[in-house]
Image (cartoon, rainbow, N blue to C red):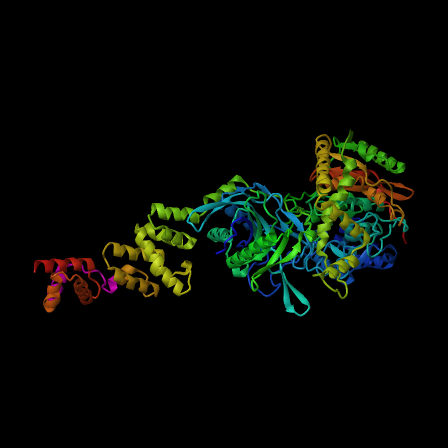
Amino acid sequence: MMTIPADWQVDIGLEIHAQLKTDSKIFSGASTQFGQPPNSQASVIDLGMPGVLPAVNGAVFKKAVQFGLGVGGQINRESRFDRKNYFYPDLPKGYQITQMDQPIVIGGSVTIALPDGSTKPIALTRAHLEEDAGKSIHDWKPNHTGVDLNRAGTPLLEIVSEPQLKSPEEAVAYARVIHQLLTYLEICDGNMAEGSLRFDANISVRKITDAKLGVRSEIKNLNSFRFLDQAINFEISRQVEMLTAGQPLSQDTRLFDPEKLETRPMRSKETATDYRYFPEPDLLPVVLSEHYIDEIKRNLPELPQARTNRYHSTLALPLADAQRLAQDRRLADFFDETVAKTQNPKVTANWIKGDLLARLNEAALTIADSPVSSDQLAELITMVDQDTISGKIAKDVFGALWEGKTTSAAAYVRDHQLEQVSDLSALEPIIESLLTDHPKQASDLKAGKDKLMGFFVGKVMQATQGTANPKQVNDLIRAKIDRS
Amino acid sequence: MTHPFSTLTQLQTQLRERSISATELTQFYLDRIAQLNPMLNCYITVDNERALDQARAADQQLAQGSAAPLTGIPISQKDIFCIEDQITTAGSKMLANFRPPYTATSASQLEQAGAITLGKTNMDEFAMGSSNETSYYGPAKNPWDLLRIPGGSSGGSAAAVAAGLCAASTGTDTGGSIRQPAAMCGLTGLKPTYGRISRWGMIAFASSLDQAGPMTHTAEDAALMLEHMAGYDPKDATSLDEPVPEYSQNLNQPMAGLRIGVCRQFFSEGLEGAVEQSIREALKTFEHLGATLIDIDLPHTPLSVSAYYVIAPAECSANLSRFDGIRFGHRCDDPTDLQDLYQRSRGEGFGNEVKKRILVGTFALSAGYYDAFYRKAQQVRRLIKNDFVEAFDHVDLIVGPTAPTPAFQLGEKLDNPVDMYLQDIFTISANLAGLPAMSIPAGQVRGLPVGLQLIGNYLQEGTLLRAGHQFQQATDWHQLAPEIE
């Protein structure tokens, strides 16, 4: 963990580019599927051919509004697209269509957890829609740069925070919260390896006594939490060292080198591009009705923080369990569905975070692919709760469900006669003969060697092939010994 | 025998009656093009084979009685409309070899209605010009006087129709580029309401101003063409989702009660006396037809040229960024690096007028100047629009001259850009406001056509066409043809 020199403070703001999960691009019908042959998914619109025009994919508005509501931001009833002008080979039109003056979302905030267990709200400046650029491939062949425009026109939501993050840890915590929210809302697949989420970090340092923010550097295109952490760490050290040595900083844009763990300048402010933003004349303003926004609000899923609170306070789960279950929307949904039937949150939570997650992890599956459904798990848990089967048998039945040997716990238990033997008349003769067969152990138990209780219970379970209720067996043995 | 200046309606009848076949008609125009185009330079590309293929298909349809309204009628397209696999240059060296893999919606609708495309007509480079002299392919000539300009930017289209090298043509109008050449060549040229015709496949100059339209001998022909060019297109977000009226069916509705606004600002300094006289005569004709003349003011129109020459260059500076030598269009030889590739490809590919406007637009949008230029121009634009909205509370049409003078001589204004820009002084305000406007022939000065401009309210193309048609029933200016053979 980074220690910031005592008399310095750090101010970090993040710009997060999230690829919105849509089948087609923001302004064309071309597919957004990742990993296709270069330029196989670039339509004439993505290529910026003469005379072609953008037509907005309406799906992006819903996703942006979901995000805006998710962070408690203000949804602009009328937002606009603008052109951001610059030349680059992977920017086909010579301008990027983005939102400058009237973004779709203004403000909002998220809460991050600090290492000391406290929490801190982080304010968002805005979130706006824009199109992604293509990719320049510099190692394609010697002295040539290839351009792949498959990514050009992929819808992005750029989420801008206020410079309220005070350390690399806070920045990463914030990035994680945003990542979780985006995946929870299912508006972004969150796949960082495929570039679905990318960070630009604005970093400056200042003396504790300075009221004004320091000169900032922007580190572009960080595509993992680790790189984000490393880049910020390096940058803080660099800036503090420079300033301590009396060297002034100039505002610049930098790239992070993950091999050397350092940042290098990309372009300085002196040569900074003037993007010459102006309203995009090919597109109409985006007007969203109250009804449209209300409808989205009504269908918004319960978000991670609210869910954690409910699990902890209302369902009385330990905080760690509540967080673990609420972290993943599908997992939490599975938990909620199961609890609705078992009415036993604690046992249900244990099953899910225990056996189910262990099996899923082992098989590298997500909850969506779980071979055991919430109905099946609920039936199983209920059978234990009602003493129909023992906990030990339940594990076997779970295994059978997982392996697809059965589709119903009840049917499996019935077919294999695994019902718990709670019938005293069936157990008593077994216990009596055991006590008779093992007189030494029986008398030791009576004399207070409680460890031997396990020996006898084990023998009974063995004799009943696990169908006996261990607690009942325990009580019966105790009663017999005490009476003998 | 076909008359080279036949109207679409005349040709429709001849084709239906089978007194001429589409193939004969097409060949007739192709022969005229071969004979006269070297002199007039109004076509950049002519595709005989494609046109004759279309003509043979048209003849089959005519024989089977399955003809569409324009089946067999040979027209031309301004070379700004992309046609799949046909070279589309926009008058620029930049696109000298560009074959688009798609067709402009309006061009494809015309072909679907049966029109035969003879070729692509000359134009000012990227539609930037009022004289056709900025074309990389040399200027088209005015058929009324080969030493004079045909107007611009749709000068090739105007010259082609006026010289009888096609039955009708298309143009685009950003600040007057349909109406001014129509006026210079004695044609009817209509710029519809912004959004009436899809811009998909039409190479952009200034997106918020560009609008396609027909260039024809008569208002009746313009109505027929517009019926097939107009309509909503989901591929153009700015196209209007409004039904397309049967313009050609409502041309004879009486003019009685029609209120015509005569705008003081359109009879300003710079308007040649003889042109003004023609326009005043035309106004009397409208009165005879039953219209009432009402004097009106559009106080902000004198600012339109200034606002236009900020907004249009600003938009073009971005629209033309895609011509970077990377994916299509001209690329310089042996670039040393990316910067060199950009600079030389664009430096070689664009002509001076285009470069000038890109520079002006880039400047107007740059940090520190945006508020003083672009924002201010947009405010002026709103004021101009408001003037019109108010005026249309009192009148149905606004009438005045299309251009301050008849066609000037080639080269005459090349060294005087401001004078050249003032060619559009009467036409630009309709683009800034997005209103439909039309030019019709309304007189002659020194043997050169004079154009009368009619501006209508939003989506009132029908009113323009009706007034134009009835004026043409009462006058014969539109029937005059140049002697070129």
Q: Is residue B167 visible?
A: no
| Side of B20 relative to A399 (left or right) | right
**Residue positioned most to the bottom:** A142
**Residue positioned most to the front:** A245
Depicted A151 relative to depicted A276: above or below: below
Q: Between residues A385 and A3, which one lies in front from this camera angle?
A: A3
Q: Position of residue B368 (x, y in %)?
A: 71, 43
Viewport quadrant of the N terminus of chain B: bottom right
**Residue positioned most to the left:** A484
Depicted A146 relative to depicted B426: above or below: below
Whether residue A424 appears in magenta in the rendering, the answer is yes
Q: Is residue B323 visible?
A: yes
Q: Which residues are magenta?
A: A413-434
Depicted A452 relative to depicted A187: above or below: below
Q: Position of residue A475 (x, y in %)?
A: 15, 57
**Residue positioned most to the right:** B446
| Side of B383 relative to B411 (left or right) | left
Residue plotted at (28% across, 64% down): A396
| Side of A39 relative to B322 (left or right) | left
Q: Position of residue B453 (x, y in %)?
A: 79, 39
Residue plotted at (70% across, 59% down): B100
